[in-house]
Amino acid sequence: MNNNWWIHVLVAAIASVLIVGFIKVAGAQGADILISIVLIIIGILFHFIPSIIAVHRNHKNKVGILLLNFFLGWTLFGWVGSLIWAVLQDADREKEKNGIRNVHESDEKECPYCAEKIKNKAKVCRFCNNSLS
Protein backbone atom coordinates (compact mmCIF):
# COMPACT_ATOMS: atom_id res chain seq x y z
CA MET A 1 0.00 0.00 0.00
CA ASN A 2 1.14 3.54 -0.69
CA ASN A 3 2.67 5.33 2.33
CA ASN A 4 1.72 8.80 1.07
CA TRP A 5 -1.53 8.91 3.06
CA TRP A 6 -0.56 12.30 4.42
CA ILE A 7 -0.88 13.81 0.93
CA HIS A 8 -4.54 12.79 0.87
CA VAL A 9 -5.08 14.30 4.33
CA LEU A 10 -3.37 17.54 3.23
CA VAL A 11 -5.46 17.79 0.06
CA ALA A 12 -8.64 17.15 2.07
CA ALA A 13 -7.65 19.84 4.60
CA ILE A 14 -6.93 22.41 1.88
CA ALA A 15 -10.20 21.55 0.14
CA SER A 16 -12.04 21.93 3.44
CA VAL A 17 -10.56 25.39 4.04
CA LEU A 18 -11.51 26.47 0.52
CA ILE A 19 -15.02 25.07 0.92
CA VAL A 20 -15.50 26.87 4.25
CA GLY A 21 -14.42 30.10 2.59
CA PHE A 22 -16.91 29.67 -0.24
CA ILE A 23 -19.72 28.70 2.10
CA LYS A 24 -19.08 31.67 4.41
CA VAL A 25 -19.18 33.99 1.41
CA ALA A 26 -22.57 32.45 0.57
CA GLY A 27 -23.82 33.34 4.07
CA ALA A 28 -24.14 29.89 5.71
CA GLN A 29 -23.33 29.43 9.41
CA GLY A 30 -22.71 26.75 12.04
CA ALA A 31 -24.11 23.30 11.26
CA ASP A 32 -24.76 24.23 7.62
CA ILE A 33 -21.03 24.66 7.08
CA LEU A 34 -20.19 21.33 8.72
CA ILE A 35 -22.84 19.46 6.74
CA SER A 36 -21.69 21.11 3.52
CA ILE A 37 -18.06 20.19 4.17
CA VAL A 38 -18.90 16.56 4.96
CA LEU A 39 -21.10 16.19 1.88
CA ILE A 40 -18.54 17.79 -0.42
CA ILE A 41 -15.70 15.60 0.91
CA ILE A 42 -17.87 12.48 0.49
CA GLY A 43 -18.68 13.60 -3.06
CA ILE A 44 -15.01 14.17 -3.90
CA LEU A 45 -14.03 10.77 -2.48
CA PHE A 46 -16.83 9.08 -4.42
CA HIS A 47 -15.77 10.88 -7.59
CA PHE A 48 -12.18 9.63 -7.26
CA ILE A 49 -13.01 6.00 -6.34
CA PRO A 50 -11.54 4.73 -9.67
CA SER A 51 -8.27 6.60 -9.04
CA ILE A 52 -8.10 5.37 -5.45
CA ILE A 53 -8.59 1.79 -6.63
CA ALA A 54 -5.88 2.18 -9.29
CA VAL A 55 -3.38 3.60 -6.79
CA HIS A 56 -4.23 0.97 -4.20
CA ARG A 57 -3.75 -1.85 -6.74
CA ASN A 58 -0.58 -0.19 -8.08
CA HIS A 59 -2.03 -0.34 -11.58
CA LYS A 60 0.57 0.29 -14.29
CA ASN A 61 -1.73 2.92 -15.87
CA LYS A 62 -2.70 4.70 -12.65
CA VAL A 63 -1.72 8.12 -14.04
CA GLY A 64 -3.91 7.61 -17.12
CA ILE A 65 -6.78 6.46 -14.93
CA LEU A 66 -6.35 9.50 -12.70
CA LEU A 67 -6.34 11.86 -15.69
CA LEU A 68 -9.41 10.23 -17.24
CA ASN A 69 -11.16 10.32 -13.88
CA PHE A 70 -10.20 13.96 -13.26
CA PHE A 71 -11.13 15.36 -16.67
CA LEU A 72 -14.04 13.13 -17.72
CA GLY A 73 -15.14 11.60 -14.42
CA TRP A 74 -17.96 14.12 -14.09
CA THR A 75 -19.64 12.37 -17.00
CA LEU A 76 -21.13 8.97 -16.35
CA PHE A 77 -19.16 7.43 -19.23
CA GLY A 78 -15.84 8.86 -18.02
CA TRP A 79 -16.41 7.69 -14.45
CA VAL A 80 -17.56 4.19 -15.41
CA GLY A 81 -14.76 3.91 -17.98
CA SER A 82 -12.09 4.84 -15.45
CA LEU A 83 -13.64 2.48 -12.89
CA ILE A 84 -13.58 -0.44 -15.35
CA TRP A 85 -10.02 0.41 -16.35
CA ALA A 86 -8.93 0.53 -12.70
CA VAL A 87 -10.57 -2.80 -11.86
CA LEU A 88 -9.28 -4.72 -14.88
CA GLN A 89 -6.29 -6.91 -14.19
CA ASP A 90 -2.98 -6.13 -15.81
CA ALA A 91 -2.55 -9.22 -17.98
CA ASP A 92 1.26 -9.12 -17.86
CA ARG A 93 1.34 -8.72 -14.09
CA GLU A 94 -1.10 -11.58 -13.60
CA LYS A 95 1.06 -13.84 -15.76
CA GLU A 96 4.17 -12.87 -13.81
CA LYS A 97 2.37 -13.40 -10.52
CA ASN A 98 1.21 -16.87 -11.60
CA GLY A 99 4.62 -17.81 -12.99
CA ILE A 100 3.47 -17.92 -16.62
CA ARG A 101 5.97 -16.58 -19.11
CA ASN A 102 5.49 -15.47 -22.66
CA VAL A 103 6.47 -18.48 -24.78
CA HIS A 104 7.16 -16.43 -27.88
CA GLU A 105 9.75 -14.21 -26.21
CA SER A 106 11.80 -16.74 -24.26
CA ASP A 107 11.69 -19.93 -26.37
CA GLU A 108 12.51 -18.47 -29.78
CA LYS A 109 15.51 -17.00 -31.53
CA GLU A 110 16.35 -15.66 -34.98
CA CYS A 111 17.87 -17.91 -37.60
CA PRO A 112 21.32 -16.48 -38.46
CA TYR A 113 20.76 -17.28 -42.17
CA CYS A 114 17.20 -16.14 -42.92
CA ALA A 115 16.31 -14.09 -39.80
CA GLU A 116 13.05 -16.01 -39.21
CA LYS A 117 11.92 -16.88 -35.68
CA ILE A 118 12.75 -20.47 -34.75
CA LYS A 119 12.82 -22.50 -31.53
CA ASN A 120 15.92 -22.20 -29.36
CA LYS A 121 16.42 -25.99 -29.45
CA ALA A 122 16.14 -26.25 -33.25
CA LYS A 123 19.07 -27.91 -35.03
CA VAL A 124 17.82 -27.07 -38.54
CA CYS A 125 15.94 -23.95 -39.60
CA ARG A 126 12.45 -24.91 -40.80
CA PHE A 127 12.39 -21.99 -43.23
CA CYS A 128 15.75 -22.17 -45.00
CA ASN A 129 16.80 -25.75 -44.00
CA ASN A 130 20.28 -24.61 -42.93
CA SER A 131 21.97 -26.47 -40.08
CA LEU A 132 22.33 -24.43 -36.89
CA SER A 133 24.91 -26.59 -35.11
Image: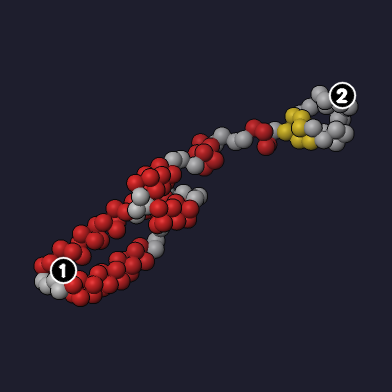
Circle 2 — which element?
loop
Q: Is residue 5 left or right of residue 85?
A: left
Crowd rating for badge 2 (residues with CA inside 10 Å; few <14, some 14–19, many 20+): few
Which residue is nearer to you in this view: 119 or 11? 11
Camera-side residue of 93 and 39: 39
Residue in the picture at 24% in, 61% down: 40
Count of marks placed on residues: 2
- Asked if the residues shown at circle 2 and circle 1 are in contact, with their CB atoms under 8 angstroms apart, the answer is no
Q: Amino acid at mark 2?
A: Asn
**Vertical order, 66 against 99 (above or below):** below
Residue 122 percent coordinates (x, y): 79, 27
- Decide which of 69, 13 is in the foreground and name it: 69
The answer to whether residue 67 is left or right of residue 107 is left
| Residue drawn at the location 45% of the way across and 56% of the way down | 67
Q: Quadrant of residue 23?
A: bottom left
Percent of width and height locating residue 121: 76, 29
Marks 2 and 1, the one that precedes in the sequence:
1
**Above or below for 105 versus 122:** below
Query: Which residue is located at x 37 percent, y 52 percent?
Result: 73
Assign the N terminus to one quadrant of the image.
bottom left
**Residue drawn at (33%, 67%) of the image:** 11
Q: Which residue is mark 1?
A: 33
Q: Is residue 130 above or below residue 84?
A: above
The answer to whether residue 18 shows anywhere in this view is yes
Depth check, front residue: 81 or 56: 81
For disc 2, the marked residue is 129
Residue 47, position as x, y percentages in the image? 32, 54
Mark 1 residue crowding within 10 angstroms, few (<14) / some (14–19) / many (20+)? some
How far is the residue under mark 2 from the one under mark 1?
81 Å
Q: Amino acid at mark 1?
A: Ile
Q: Quadrant of the C terminus?
A: top right
Residue 8, image quadrant: bottom left
